[in-house]
Amino acid sequence: MSSTSQKHKDFVAEPMGEKPVGALAGIGDALGGRLEEKGFDKAYVVLGQFLVLKKDEELFRDWLKDTCRANVKQQGDCYGCLKEWCDAFL
Amino acid sequence: MSLSEKSDEEISKLLAEYGIKHGPIVDSTRKLYERKLEVAMENAPVEPSSDKTYYREEAEEITYITYSPVRQESDVLKRRGNIEPDEDEESDQETEAPVQIANRTANHSAVRSRELDRKSGGSVWKVIRLLLLAVLAAALYYAYCRVLKNEENPFNIQ
């Protein structure tokens, strides 16, 4: 397993509150912009989608790919970030 | 009917049929599941719960019933005529006859199945084949009895 980024560590360290979607690991400016266009402007909205997909990795990855054209690495980073956050706080 | 016209429940049922793990069908997940179903349907076009099951045996057994049985019956009659006089050649000819009949059906069905659309003539052809086999068995038994009769006489003379 690859080591997690600083962004990942920052995100999973505390409740996400009103953090923007760009605070998620794997979600940079481009992906963040596409997600905001679709209405996913806050991290907790993406969290909502993650939970509605029953925290399933394959479904969430597919959804990310369809929604903001995330590549495999970005999908994995975002999934891992949300999963760890849920393990800690949900 | 396109997937987008189906209700959420129907989508949920289809996902379960194709074995796709899924959550609730809501606005934000609907398109994702429709796309997944489209891919699954392309890979497995026959729906698992469909009543129209397609048996490959039926397709391969398609034959024209009109002329082929007539030809084969006349061949069987010819074989029967040849069986009676010779003792040694009997077994060869008897084994030849069923083999030839089987080959003909295979050839017919192989040719026909490529040319024709699927029809349900297979069951009728099966009945005819069974009848022919019964006739052949009766002929063999009759011939066998005659052979036994012929063999008994030389022993009695002694």
Image (cartoon, coloured by chain):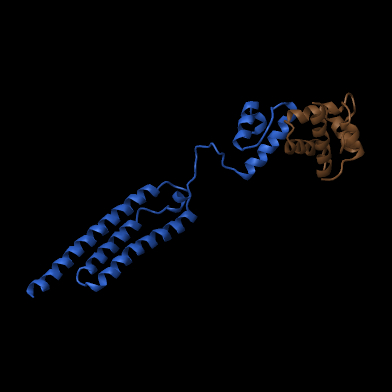
Chain colours: A brown, B blue
Residue B120 x, y percent position in the rendering: 42, 46
Could you tell me which residue is drawn at 29 percent across and 53 percent down? B131
- State which quarter of the image contains the C terminus of chain B: bottom left
Could you tell me which residue is drawn at 75 percent across and 37 percent down? A57
In the displayed structure, B7 sits above or below A69; it is above
Residue A22 x, y percent position in the rendering: 90, 33
Q: In which quarter of the image is residue A37?
A: top right
Q: Quadrant of residue B49?
A: top right
Residue nearer the viewer, B7 or A52: A52
Could you tell me which residue is drawn at 79 percent across and 33 percent down? A83
Query: Can residue B7 be spotted in the picture?
Result: no
User: Residue placed farthest to the top in the image?
Assistant: A17
In the displayed structure, B82 sits above or below A12; it is below
User: Residue placed farthest to the left in the image?
Assistant: B157
Residue B12 lies left or right of residue B81; in this view the side is right
Residue A25 x, y percent position in the rendering: 87, 36
Residue B46 lies left or right of residue B65; in this view the side is right
Q: In which quarter of the image is residue B99?
A: bottom left
Query: Can residue B9 be spotted in the picture?
Result: yes
Residue nearer the viewer, B126 or B155: B155
Residue A87 lies left or right of residue B46; in this view the side is right
Residue A39 x, y percent position in the rendering: 84, 27
Could you tell me which residue is drawn at 49 percent across and 45 percent down? B54
How many circles with numbers are drawn on the protein? 0
- State which quarter of the image contains the N terminus of chain B: top right
User: Residue placed farthest to the bottom in the image?
Assistant: B158
In the displayed structure, A42 sits above or below A5; it is above
